[in-house]
């Protein structure tokens, strides 16, 4: 009895009744998932706004924007953006998008909401930790945004924060308290991500319901699981780097700052530190972070493609091993971000070979997605179109990765727009398409209402054409040798001759239109919350466990019952079955089991 | 309409958190909780390993590439501190095995934990008195960094110990096979081992 009482107290919790416990400091994984999701929505709006300001400035560098001065009194005196302000917008755009959107929504948002239900659990393994993870992430976001409003404004050193720029307060306006807040924010974010990762892994390992073996898990669960492992191993290293960096800034140590520096006519009192040490620590985290952003998208895409092709996922086992391989190889390639740092050509070659080898599991996944579509009875829902769009973007971004992964080619492309094009395609936009697919797919489950499909498809087409219009030309700019991070190109003759100005104008117009299409999405999201058609339990005729419970699910998901799993996750069009899909929880006799 | 399509005959299990037994096979709630807490603790320790692995690699790289590294003389009280934390692991094990006097041994473990921290603080004070500060030299920077980071983790361990102690005080005979005790023990032994490793690193690796 004592043990019963203890376990009850430790992790079971009754459905809360008060507003604060129910929606603010909630222990329910579903509410926490939604909190993460809407935090990402706020962050993506901020990040998108910053990118528009940058795109505007690239085309009309001398334009006077009155309200810009109100927003950034120091960085835009008279309404004209300074190069320093441009750099701080770039830094914050990158940081907010990478951490508070790409890391937050696909893993912490959808993962929190869906993972426990898909494995037949009542909640995550540690609900209190889960709540803490979210609120630390929220605090981290507040600290990050606060960096805009301190003396000097937001930092200039990019999302990679290379020292000595990031380690010295004398190097620029945003390098004072702005940079310190930035590091503090990421330290908080790392701590929250570690707690979250620990929770995801324990949940997946220990809370799976009867019959749900690892090889019967939906691929979404596999990607959340592997992503959590990556997060657990990578964020601790970022935290370590952040501690060292902040000590260099505030305690006068010299981990990263070399001797003999003179900044703004001032001799810097540091010696012997290594800026390269930061680059190694940062990219040891930074490269797995790329997969943290993209893997959950791959899971959603697999789930959606299988569902709407009415076919089992092609090569389930190969998919699982590809996810594991991508995760494992992701820890051995960080050096490819540092080819121009003067590393030994032999190390560069090793990093290059490992980088190329990631192409193998990636190609397996792409092949299997196409194999899943092949001959399927395809239903073109909004979710399905975004999933197919993901595959397209993943291939496009992956191909430019083959160029960048080779040291001699990278020597030219490094720090040009080619790199910007590459990572936006594969890490930014592809991952965002995964989120859109997830939103259109799970919205009925999350809110009990359907999103508008017509608006969804319109949103897809404008966004799909729009992102290609924005990012394809950047490859050409990179080929011309157009450096990234420059706030203006006036006076750079070779760029003017190659038509860079017109290309920038085209991309800015494309960006404006694409952002306009996102307003359609936000409108659809909020309109459907209140006015959407009521959703049935299983509107897409999917097979996984979340489609066996009401929309939205009750507080403890399965109403105190323990679901039993008898089937693999993607049994569509099974010969001899009464319907064209077999739920995972259907009795064993319904049809021959797949996989 | 939204209706529950419930699986046919549901075994309602006693534990609250998840329905799953992970690998399919009706364990009782207590055993599941222990496994869950242990898994979580191991994973947390995995993150701690990565944190200190990153610090270690920074230590090795920073020392190897620089000409400004000056080894510091480590205070000899660190030997005593090492003995204290090793003994605290033994008292913790005694508490886990000896149900009758568990409270006593848990109390002793907590006190030893605090003594260890105090000893580390004395070591800091001795270094400061000798004019060795955080920013004096990369070797001293790393000394304060590593002992400080480890100390923060020890504070966490002491808080967990105090929680366990409080429970054992109020609920008689509670210590045996409790998830929180198992997790705290795992964590505490790990922090003990981590300190021995760090001491070795600072002692042997710090020479040049």
Image (tube, rainbow, N blue to C red):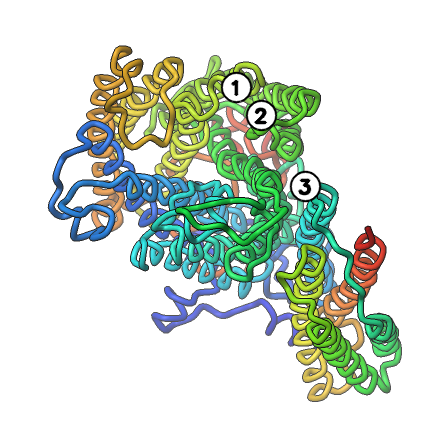
Q: Residues within 10 Å of mark 3 (few under 14, many from 20)?
A: some
Corner quadrant of residue A355: top right
Nearer-N-terminus badge (2/3):
3
Report which residue position mark 3 lands on.
A213
Horizontal side, residue A186 vs residue B124: left or right: left
Q: Which residue is depicted at the point 32% across and 17% down?
A: A473
Tell me if residue A539 comes above or below residue A343 in the rendering: below
Pointers 2 and 1 in contact (C-beta within 8 Å):
yes
Q: 10 Å neighbourhood of mark 1: few (<14), some, or many (≥20)?
A: many
Across and down, in percent, residue A83 comes to 28, 38
Q: Position of residue A204 (x, y in %)?
A: 62, 48
Image quadrant occupied by the C terminus of chain A: top right
> What residue is drawn where x is 61% and y is 57%?
B19
Label 1 sits on residue: A410
| Sequence-earlier tag: 1 or 3 | 3
| Residue A95 appears in view | yes
Residue, disc 2: A339
Q: CA distance from mark 2 to mark 3?
A: 42 Å
| Quadrant of residue A1 within the rendered picture | bottom right
User: What separation in Å lies between label 1 and label 3 (alpha carbons)?
Assistant: 43 Å
- Determine whether A362 is above or below A134 in the image: above
Q: Residue at x 23, y 19 (%)?
A: A501
Q: Position of residue A451 (x, y in %)?
A: 28, 40
Horizontal relation, residue A102 to residue A339: left or right: left
Q: Residues within 10 Å of mark 2 (few under 14, many from 20)?
A: many
Mark closer to the observer (1, 3): 1
* B139 with respect to B73 (left or right): left
Give the chain letter at badge 3.
A
- Where disc 3 sits, the SS reads loop
Q: CA distance from mark 2 to mark 1?
A: 7 Å
């Amino acid at each position: 009895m004592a043990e019963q009482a203890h376990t009850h107290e430790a992790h079971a919790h009754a459905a809360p009744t008060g507003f604060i416990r129910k929606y603010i400091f909630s222990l329910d994984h579903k509410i926490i998932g939604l909190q993460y999701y809407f935090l990402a929505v706020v962050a993506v709006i901020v990040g998108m706004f910053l990118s528009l300001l940058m795109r505007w400035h690239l085309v009309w560098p001398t334009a006077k924007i009155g309200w810009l001065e109100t927003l950034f009194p120091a960085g835009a005196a008279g309404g004209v953006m300074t190069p320093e302000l441009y750099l701080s917008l770039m830094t914050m755009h990158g940081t907010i998008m990478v951490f508070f959107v790409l890391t937050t929504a696909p893993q912490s948002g959808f993962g929190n909401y869906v993972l426990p239900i898909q494995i037949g659990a009542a909640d995550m393994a540690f609900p209190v930790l889960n709540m803490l993870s979210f609120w630390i992430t929220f605090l981290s976001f507040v600290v990050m945004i606060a960096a805009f409003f301190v003396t000097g404004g937001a930092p200039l050193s990019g999302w990679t924060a290379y020292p000595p720029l990031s380690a010295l307060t004398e190097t620029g306006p945003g390098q004072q308290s702005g940079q310190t807040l930035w590091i503090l924010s990421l330290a908080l974010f790392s701590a929250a991500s570690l707690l979250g990762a620990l929770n995801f892994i324990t949940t997946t390992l220990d809370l799976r319901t009867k019959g749900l073996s690892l090889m019967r898990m939906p691929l979404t669960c596999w990607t959340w699981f592997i992503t959590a492992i990556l997060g657990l191993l990578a964020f601790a290293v970022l935290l370590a780097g952040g501690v060292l960096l902040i000590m260099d800034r505030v305690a006068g140590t010299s981990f990263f700052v070399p001797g003999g520096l003179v900044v703004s006519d001032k001799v810097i009192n540091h010696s012997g530190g290594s800026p390269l040490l930061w680059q190694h620590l940062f990219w040891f985290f930074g490269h797995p972070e790329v997969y943290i952003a993209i893997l959950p998208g791959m899971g959603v895409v697999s789930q959606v493609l299988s569902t709407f092709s009415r076919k089992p996922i092609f090569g389930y086992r190969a998919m699982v091993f590809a996810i594991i391989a991508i995760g494992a190889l992701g820890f051995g390639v960080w050096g490819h971000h540092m080819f121009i740092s003067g590393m030994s050509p032999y190390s560069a070659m090793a990093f290059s070979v490992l980088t190329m080898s990631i192409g193998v599991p990636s190609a397996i996944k792409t092949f299997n997605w196409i194999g899943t579509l092949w001959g399927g009875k395809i239903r073109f829902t909004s979710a399905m179109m975004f999933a197919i769009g993901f595959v397209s973007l993943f291939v496009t971004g992956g191909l430019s990765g083959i160029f960048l992964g080779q040291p001699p080619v990278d020597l030219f492309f490094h720090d040009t727009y080619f790199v910007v094009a590459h990572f936006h395609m594969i890490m930014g936009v592809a991952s965002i398409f995964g989120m859109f697919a997830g939103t259109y797919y799970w919205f009925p489950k999350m809110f009990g209402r359907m999103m508008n499909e017509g608006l969804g498809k319109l949103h897809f087409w404008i966004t799909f054409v729009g992102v290609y219009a924005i990012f394809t030309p950047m490859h050409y700019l990179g080929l011309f040798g157009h450096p990234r991070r420059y706030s203006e190109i006036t006076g750079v003759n070779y760029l003017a001759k190659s038509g860079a100005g017109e290309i920038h104008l085209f991309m800015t117009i494309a960006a404006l239109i694409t952002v306009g299409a996102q307003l359609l999405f936000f409108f659809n999201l909020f309109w459907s919350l209140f006015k959407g058609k009521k959703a049935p339990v299983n509107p897409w005729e999917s097979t996984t466990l979340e489609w066996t419970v009401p929309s939205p699910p009750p507080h403890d998901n399965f109403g105190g019952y323990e679901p039993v799993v008898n089937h693999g996750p993607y049994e569509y069009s099974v010969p001899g079955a009464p319907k064209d899909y077999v739920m995972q929880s259907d009795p064993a006799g319904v049809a021959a089991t797949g996989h | 309409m939204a209706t529950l399509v419930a699986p046919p005959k549901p075994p309602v299990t006693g534990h609250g958190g998840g329905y799953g037994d992970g690998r399919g096979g009706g364990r009782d709630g207590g055993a599941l909780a222990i496994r869950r807490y242990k898994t979580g603790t191991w994973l947390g320790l995995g993150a701690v390993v990565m944190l200190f692995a990153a610090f270690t690699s920074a230590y090795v790289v920073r020392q190897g590439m620089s000409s400004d590294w000056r080894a510091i003389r480590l205070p000899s009280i660190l030997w005593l501190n090492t003995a204290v934390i090793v003994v605290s692991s033994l008292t913790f094990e005694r508490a886990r095995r000896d149900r009758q006097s568990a409270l006593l041994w848990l109390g002793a473990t907590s006190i030893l934990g605090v003594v260890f921290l105090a000893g580390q603080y004395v070591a800091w004070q001795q270094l400061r008195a000798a004019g060795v500060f955080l920013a004096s030299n990369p070797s001293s920077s790393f000394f304060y960094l590593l002992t400080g980071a480890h100390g923060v983790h020890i504070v966490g361990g002491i808080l967990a110990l105090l929680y366990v102690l409080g429970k054992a005080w109020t609920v008689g005979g509670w210590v045996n096979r409790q998830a929180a005790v198992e997790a705290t023990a795992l964590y505490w032994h790990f922090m003990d081992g981590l300190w021995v490793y760090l001491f070795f690193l600072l002692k042997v690796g710090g020479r040049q």
